[in-house]
Amino acid sequence: MTLPQTLGIPASDQGSVELVLRAGQPTFVLGANGTGKSALLVKLAQMLGGLARRMIASRPIILESDAPEITPSQAMALRSNMASWDAMPAYRAKAPNLAQRAQLYLNALSELENQFARGVLANVRAPGELDIPALRARRSPLERINGALAAAAFEISIFMDASGSVQARKSASEPYGVSNLSDGERAALIMLIELLYMHDAAVMLIDEPERHIHRALLLPLLKEMVELRPECSLVVATHDIELPVAFPESPVALLRGMTELNERWVVDVVSGAREIPFDIREAILGSRRRVLFIEGDEQGLDYGLYNLLIKDISVTALGTSREVEQAVLGARGLHDFEWLMAWGIIDRDGRSDAQIAELRARGIWCIPVYSVESIYYHPKVIGEMSRRSVDLHGGSPDSLMAAAQKAACTAIEPHIDRLAKRAVEKTVREEVLSAVPKWQELSECDQISVPVNPRDLYEKERAALCQAVNDNAWEHIVARCPIRESPALRVIATAIGFQSAGQYESAARKALIDDEAFRAVVLQLLGEPPAGLLK
């Protein structure tokens, strides 16, 4: 069998509704509790036969050991049985032999690594000139798994030790067995192993992955899974509307109910999440949905930061500040978006206090730094991370913090001219865009005037930055400059005791997860929020 596959979902009107599964494109099954999502995945498994691999949400994520304890022949027999069980209606919400299934995943990982090693050895022994760069460019299954985990912001890496035991490491921690991973980490690892182990053109049926994995990690993980095996297909059954929204071109099967006796569904298939009708949204959500639109994309640090700081809200990255403003305006003013309670967050970009107050009244939060990523390097965050570093390495947190900020100011100094220009660039762009008339005003607009002097702004900005560097006024620099475009981030991280800026930022996110008081401090750095955003 190959992809695409066209399947007919039995419909309640005695007909069928066509669902097309395509390679490299996830398909979503969306519905409230009791509408038959799990039962439909069983039906799809029956239709697909050996092409399907099913992951069941209500199944406990169990890894009782760290190394495979079954033989290859036992694994082959178990896989055959598992394919039959996954297509049985009796096992739509449970699965037999959970401990053996866990062994199967570890066995599959070992087999994948051994296959890779044999392939490399075959290349080395083949006649002719050895292509060393091509061999180095090949990624092992574990390297591909770790790449996907890192891209999805899981703060773990997986490896196999000399005994064949599968181990995990978090940042610079000591290794520990994968049996000690969290529920969400185990779920992500198992899905990635199964994905790599599947045949080409196979279909993974994933039942409610949000039960185990937080949306902030699940969305990028699904995207990584699509990129990891573009020749395969994913079908994801979910309550979470935000999952299909993140894949706007993916088809969505909308379930309103099913009849148990003859396994028929009240179902519609739409071409994308934009076509999900209000009654489905309301049945799933139960109330209006809180949504926060932000600048940038879902791979940026700000996306993860807002998911940590602001609870009970869906974060959606749109790109530019203009797109954020338009999305909030549309969501608050149009009937088609009445299911949303929407806010936006944008960078200050040289806006005046009056402009910021006006935007806040419209539900848009202007944060008082050049970019939200700069929050990671605000003096108060540096101070907290210095205290945590001292707990591990000793020393004085105040001395570490002072040394880090002084070193950062020194690192900024050779880049002052460019950073000043970049800061002014955002200010000038905002002034120009604010002068563009709305479409209703075009018929009465003869000329656009932009009262801004870029050279004057640049000279003032450069002078202020020079003074800030001389005064070691790091807080001013963070508020005004794109510090990520300088060596300052690495300098701060290493001065405090971290190996890299990435490790420092990862530790800061972990601190935000663990420490409610620290989250409150960081939230205050963002300034006064629009009404209703923070519960």
Image (spheres, rainbow, N blue to C red):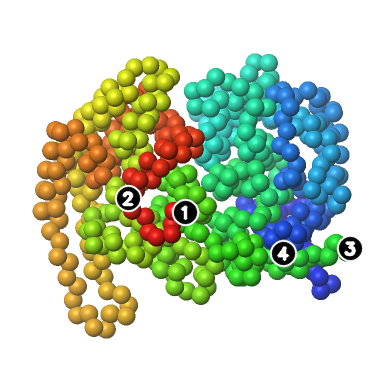
Q: For mark 1, does the 10 Å Cα neighbourhood hold few (<14), some (14 to 19), or many (20 or more) residues?
A: few
Q: Tell me residue 272's x, y (percent).
A: 60, 64
What residue would you read off at disc 3?
Answer: 261
Mark 3 residue type: Leu
- Between disc 1 and disc 3, whose residue precedes? 3
Q: Tell me residue 423's x, y (percent).
A: 23, 48
Considering only vertical position in the picture, is 176 above or below 360?
Answer: above
- Which residue does the image show at 29% across and 35% down from the upper left? 379
Mark 4 residue type: Leu
C-alpha separation, residue under disc 1 versus residue under disc 4: 32 Å
Q: Nearer the viewer, residue 73 or 368?
A: 368
Mark 2 residue type: Gly
Considering only vertical position in the picture, is 232 above or below 154?
Answer: below
- Which residue does the image show at 58% across and 45% down from the upper left? 214
Q: For residue 503, which numbered disc appears in the image? A: none
C-alpha separation, residue under disc 3 versus residue under disc 2: 57 Å
- Between disc 1 and disc 2, whose residue precedes? 2
Corner quadrant of residue 386? top left
C-alpha separation, residue under disc 1 versus residue under disc 2: 16 Å
Q: For residue 535, which numbered disc appears in the image? A: 1
Q: Determine the secondary structure under disc 4.
A: strand
Q: For mark 3, does the 10 Å Cα neighbourhood hold few (<14), some (14 to 19), or many (20 or more) residues?
A: few
Q: Nearer the viewer, residue 323 or 334?
A: 334
- Between disc 2 and disc 4, whose residue precedes? 4
Corner quadrant of residue 38? bottom right
Mark 1 residue type: Lys
